[in-house]
Structures are given as C-alpha cells and as structure tokens.
Amino acid sequence: MNAPLAKVATAIFDTTRAPEWVEDLEKATLVRWVSGTEYIEYDHINTPFVMKDRDFVSSVKILIEKPAQDSPVLKFVYHSAEDPARPPTRFVRGNLMSTTFILTSLENDTKTHVIGEVHADPMGSVPKWIVNFFQKDWPIDTLQGLRKQVAKADVKTDPRFTALLTAATENQAVPVPVSATPYRASPKTKSQ
C-alpha cells in the first residue's frame, strides 16, 4: 500500500467507514472495548440472493511487535466471540475461526506491506462450492478497496496508531491503550 502503516491501521480499525472498502460489508460496528487493545466488533455481510445475509461477532486484538532490526509490525487478530450486546439476529451467524491483518512498515514508513488472512465458515446449509464460488474474488476486491481507501484525502491517520508505532520504533514502552477516546477525524460517508 502506498500509505504509512498508521494510516492503513486507521482504515482497518475505523468500523464506521469499513463498508466503503470491505467487499460485501453492509455494516460494521465497534460494540465495546474489552481492554486497551481488544474490542468486540459486529459485522453484517450482504450475500447474494440465493443465501441469507450473514453476521459475525468478533473479538479483535491489536498487537504490535518490533523485531530487533526491523520495522514495527502491527496486527489485527479476529476470532468469533459472543457478546450480550449482539444477540443472534434474523441473519445467519457466521463463525470466524481466524482473521488476521499483518501490517509492516516499508521504505521509511512511506509504504505498508499488508497480509490479510481469513478463515471463516458462513454457517447455514449452503454448499461449500457455492460459498467458494461467490467468495473467489473477495480477497482481491477487499485489498484493492483498502488500497483505494487509504488513498482518500479525507481518511485521516488516527494519532493513537502513530504513537504506538513511534514508541515501538524507538524501543520505548508502547502506549498500549488505543481505546482511551474515540477518534473521529474521518467523516462518515455513504458507500458508493
């Protein structure tokens, strides 16, 4: 991605604007914070007419690592969770076994290498071959959407991610709590 790591992290973290770039995502909501670096997220996925829509409730952990001689690595790690604030709906509740976004800063933090891995079961009675048929373009479309999202001028970097990365780069104690206050510099816009 042609954007600093903190800006890419901001785009992934900003549930209010996630439907602008995540393929088939109808709605995303940060439900609540579990800790300074873990939160519960709700996602509603619009599916093709042959299936009922899916929704997912996930526990998301934000991890930062600083390998000895390398640039900082920031990870978003998602797993299915249950939360009383998001009981089952009329949609089919999917199972997110593991989803990870791994972000690595490149070229003096002018670019970011992104690895996205998703292992999910949409549940329900839809044959796997139909699921795979409709999902075959999802990874490419989603990463292309993320690339376009971080290029938007109105997507502003959340300063909390900048602080995390600066501390990790300078081998300081990492200021862990991302959740202290909500950051809303990017205006919410309707997905096209």
Image: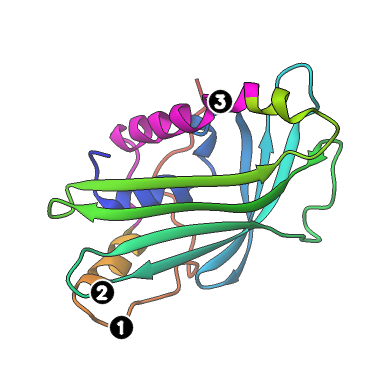
Residue drawn where x is 22% and y is 79% of the image: 171
Three-letter residue code for mark 2: Ala
Q: Residue at x 25, y 81 (%)?
A: 172
x and y percentages locating residue 61 in the rendered image: 53, 64
Residue position marked by numbered label 1 in the rendering: 173
- Cβ–Cβ under 8 Å for marks 1 and 2: yes
The residue lying at 42 percent from left, 30 percent from top is 145
- Residue depth check, mark 1 versus mark 3: number of the one nearer the observer: 3
For label 3, count other residues whose C-alpha is less than 10 Å away and answer few (under 14), some (14-19) or many (20+).
Answer: few
Distance between the alpha carbons at the discs numbered 1 and 2: 6 Å
Q: On the image, numbered disc 3 is attached to which residue?
A: 136
* Cα–Cα span, label 1 and label 3: 42 Å
Region of the chain picked out in magenta, as a range:
133-158
From the top left corner, tell me how far across and down residue 192 is, in percent. Answer: 50, 20
Q: Nearer the viewer, mark 3 or mark 2?
A: 3
Foreground residue, 149 or 107?
A: 107
Q: Residue furthest bottom?
A: 173
Measured along the vertical axis of the image, is residue 155 above or below residue 48? below
Query: Is there CB contact under 8 Å for labels 1 and 3?
Result: no
Mark 2 = which residue?
A: 167
